[in-house]
Image (tube, rainbow, N blue to C red):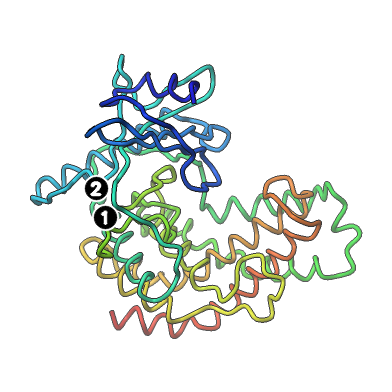
């Protein structure tokens, strides 16, 4: 605890620290709750994973720009209890930076939001909440004056993911294609058959038809905070907030939420795309984005629902061919199982595209 107190002492905290304990079970950053004495607010201390977020200055500049813009919007709208509706990051005591570089280890502190909770439940009700929350989040940032950078460059670039797969196939560093009995080449053929079509977003962007927005890029139900009455307070986990296509927020949520099974379930023959989740999330999202969404963004939302399981299948498959160098695995064929699962979800989603278009048009 002494080490954490030393780190926290660099930030402009109010009150005295009573204790610091681990908070949550995040996979990327190490997170701790700072409990203070008396009436001072409590805080969240995080070690930023700079192996993933390599430009911490850019990361924190993005977050400060986004939270400041949202705070100004809430103040202009006369909202109350604003500190529970947008995250607030503390500066250092001796500068306006919102992160500490402690000999190559990076830390930040935000104000803890009391009497708030997150949910893991994925059902139509919470999917509708998520659609509206993330849609509203994008809408509030549609006029942000600052230019934000990409915290993970080309994170959702389908053309890049296809290139990476082709490079893996050409090198075959683990010899898995060379020893293949046929299945790997069948998966590769299925991917290549639709690769050009799935790279549509990048082409539309180059043609000037598709804008980039400020998106969350990690749209999960548990990245929203609710109050005790079930009202949405704010969107959290802002590390991946950056310029992207709205397809990122729409498609990435549905990739996990609309799958009948977890992404690494080996029973891929029972994977299916859940249309009740699609409808609920779409209802919330269209309501939240009505102020800015263009016709071309709107009409391609079903494409986004198909794009993200396809993209994830490509990423899992490339990692399998490369010898499992990126994703953590629990057994030798884990990435191959993930690939089968995501390709099954992709095929299911493609078979329902017509129904998706009908739903989007109805909204």
Instruction: Say which residue label 2 marks.
Output: 84
Q: Tell me the crowding category of disc 1: few under 14, some 14 to 19, or many 20 or more residues within 10 angstroms, Cα based.
A: many
User: Could you say which is closer to the camera, residue 354 or residue 4?
Assistant: 4
Helix or strand or loop: what does disc 1 sit on? strand
Residue 290 pos. (x, y %): 23, 66
Residue 333 bears which disc, if any? Answer: none
Residue at the image point whose x is 39% and y is 51% from the top? 216
Image position of 303 with respect to 235: above or below: below
Label count reads 2
Is residue 40 shown above or below 260?
above
Alpha carbon of mark 2 to alpha carbon of mark 1: how far?
6 Å
Left of 176 or right of it: where is 72?
Answer: left
Left or right, 181 with reference to 89: right
* Residue at left offset 40%, top offset 80%: 357
Rendered residue at 43%/42% (across/down) = 239
- Give how far across and how far down residue 293 sits, in percent: 28, 63
Residue ranking furthest to the top: 94
Q: Which residue is mark 1?
A: 233
Q: Position of residue 346 (x, y in %)?
A: 59, 73
The reply to whether discs 2 and 1 touch (Cβ–Cβ < 8 Å) is yes
Quarter the C terminus occupies: bottom left
Classify 10 Å Cα crowding around label 2: few (below 14), some (14-19), many (20 and above): some
Q: Secondary structure at mark 2?
A: helix
Where residue 134 appears, as percent x and y from the top left, is: 33, 59
Q: At 73% from the left edge and 45% from the top edge, which residue is drawn?
A: 325
Q: Quadrant of residue 287?
A: bottom left
Marked residue nearer the N-terminal end (2 or 1): 2
């Amino acid at each position: 605890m002494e080490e954490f107190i030393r780190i926290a002492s660099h930030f402009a905290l109010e009150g005295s620290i009573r204790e610091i304990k681990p908070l949550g079970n995040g996979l990327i950053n190490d997170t701790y709750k700072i409990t203070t004495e008396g009436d001072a607010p409590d805080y969240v201390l995080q070690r930023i994973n700079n192996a993933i977020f390599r430009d911490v200055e850019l990361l924190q500049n993005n977050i400060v720009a986004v939270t400041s813009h949202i705070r100004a919007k809430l103040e202009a709208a006369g909202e109350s209890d604003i500190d529970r509706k947008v995250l607030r990051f503390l500066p250092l005591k001796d500068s306006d930076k919102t992160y500490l570089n402690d000999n190559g280890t990076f830390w930040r502190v935000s104000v803890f939001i009391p009497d708030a909770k997150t949910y893991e439940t994925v059902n139509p009700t919470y999917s509708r909440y998520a659609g509206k929350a993330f849609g509203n989040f994008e809408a509030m940032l549609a006029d942000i004056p600052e230019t934000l950078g990409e915290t993970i460059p080309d994170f959702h670039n389908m053309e890049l993911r296809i290139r990476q797969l082709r490079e893996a196939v050409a090198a075959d560093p683990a010899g898995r294609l060379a020893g293949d009995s046929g299945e790997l080449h069948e998966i590769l053929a299925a991917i290549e058959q639709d690769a050009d079509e799935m790279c549509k977003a990048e082409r539309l962007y180059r043609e000037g038809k598709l804008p980039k927005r400020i998106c969350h890029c990690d749209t999960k139900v548990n990245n929203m905070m609710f109050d005790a009455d079930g009202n949405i307070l704010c969107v959290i986990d802002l590390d991946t907030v950056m310029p992207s296509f709205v397809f990122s927020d729409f498609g990435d949520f549905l990739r996990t939420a609309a799958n009948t099974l977890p992404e690494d379930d080996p029973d891929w023959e029972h994977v299916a795309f859940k249309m009740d989740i699609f409808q609920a999330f779409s209802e919330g999202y269209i309501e939240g984005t009505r102020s800015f969404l263009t016709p071309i963004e709107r009409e391609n939302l079903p494409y986004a629902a198909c794009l993200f399981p396809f993209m994830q299948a490509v990423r899992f498959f490339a990692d399998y061919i490369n010898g499992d160098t990126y994703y953590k695995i629990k057994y030798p064929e884990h990435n191959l199982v993930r690939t089968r699962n995501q390709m099954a979800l992709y095929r299911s989603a493609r078979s329902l595209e017509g129904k998706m278009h009908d739903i989007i048009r109805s909204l």
